[in-house]
């Protein structure tokens, strides 16, 4: 099941496979992106529940800072710069969507892997 429209997928997935994934080869960078995505997903209901304006304003920082920090520390790129939000070659929303996709792919992969390991142990 794919929730993205087909017209969007035909443009997005070449970007994801040819631009996004090659820029995220270091596992530490991916981990920081996953942490930022998860923190952002937790922050939304938290900030909505408390309805404090500062909490809502802090969302982009909570969501994006780990990834920006990871690129600065582990995967520097002179061509596009460390601050990837300034890129104009692709929409910023595509990078946000790609962060969520890689997060959900990793969660799915590790949950399936753990399930597979548990099944193998129960067979033995």
Image (spheres, rainbow, N blue to C red):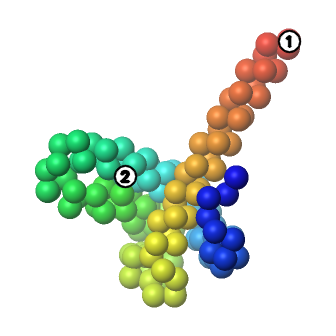
Q: Under tag 1, what secondary structure?
A: loop
Label 1 Cα crowd, 10 Å radius (few <14 / some 14-19 / many 20+): few
- Quarter holding residue 18: bottom right
Label 2 Cα crowd, 10 Å radius (few <14 / some 14-19 / many 20+): some
Q: Nearer the viewer, mark 1 or mark 2?
A: 2
Q: Position of residue 38 (x, y in %)?
A: 43, 47
Above or below 105: residue 78: below
Horizontal side of residue 10 vs 98, given as left or right: right
- Quarter holding residue 82: bottom left
What is the number of the mark on residue 124? 1
* Image quadrant occupied by the C terminus: top right
Q: Under tag 2, what secondary structure?
A: helix
The answer for how far apart the CA atoms under marks 1 and 2 are is 41 Å
Residue picked out by circle 2: 40
Residue at x 58%, y 57% (from the top left corner): 101
What is the number of the mark on residue 56? none
Residue at x 38%, y 82% (from the top left corner): 86
Badge 1 vs badge 2, beta-carbon distance below 8 Å: no
Q: Position of residue 77 (x, y in %)?
A: 51, 78
Of residues 9 and 40, the one nearer the viewer is 9
Residue at x 65%, y 34% (from the top left corner): 111
Above or below 102: residue 42: above
Total residue callouts: 2
Q: Position of residue 114 (x, y in %)?
A: 68, 29
Task: Answer with mark 1 or mark 2, whichever residue precedes in sequence.
Answer: 2
Above or below 108: residue 28: below
Asked if one can make out residue 16 in the rendered structure from this viewpoint, the answer is: yes
Of residues 38 and 4, the one nearer the viewer is 4
Q: Position of residue 23 (x, y in %)?
A: 58, 71
Horizontal side of residue 18 vs 70, given as left or right: right
Residue at x 37%, y 62% (from the top left corner): 64
Asked if one can make out residue 73 in the rendered structure from this viewpoint, the answer is: no
């Amino acid at each position: 099941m794919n929730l993205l429209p087909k017209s969007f997928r035909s443009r997005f997935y070449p970007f994801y496979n040819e631009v996004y994934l090659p820029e995220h080869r270091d596992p530490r960078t991916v981990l920081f992106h996953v942490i930022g995505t998860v923190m952002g997903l937790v922050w939304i209901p938290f900030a909505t529940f408390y309805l404090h304006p500062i909490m809502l304003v802090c969302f982009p920082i909570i969501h994006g800072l780990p990834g920006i920090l990871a690129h600065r520390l582990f995967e520097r790129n002179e061509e596009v710069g460390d601050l990837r939000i300034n890129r104009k070659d692709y929409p910023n929303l595509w990078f946000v969507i790609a962060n969520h996709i890689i997060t959900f792919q990793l969660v799915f992969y590790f949950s399936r892997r753990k399930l597979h390991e548990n099944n193998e142990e129960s067979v033995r």
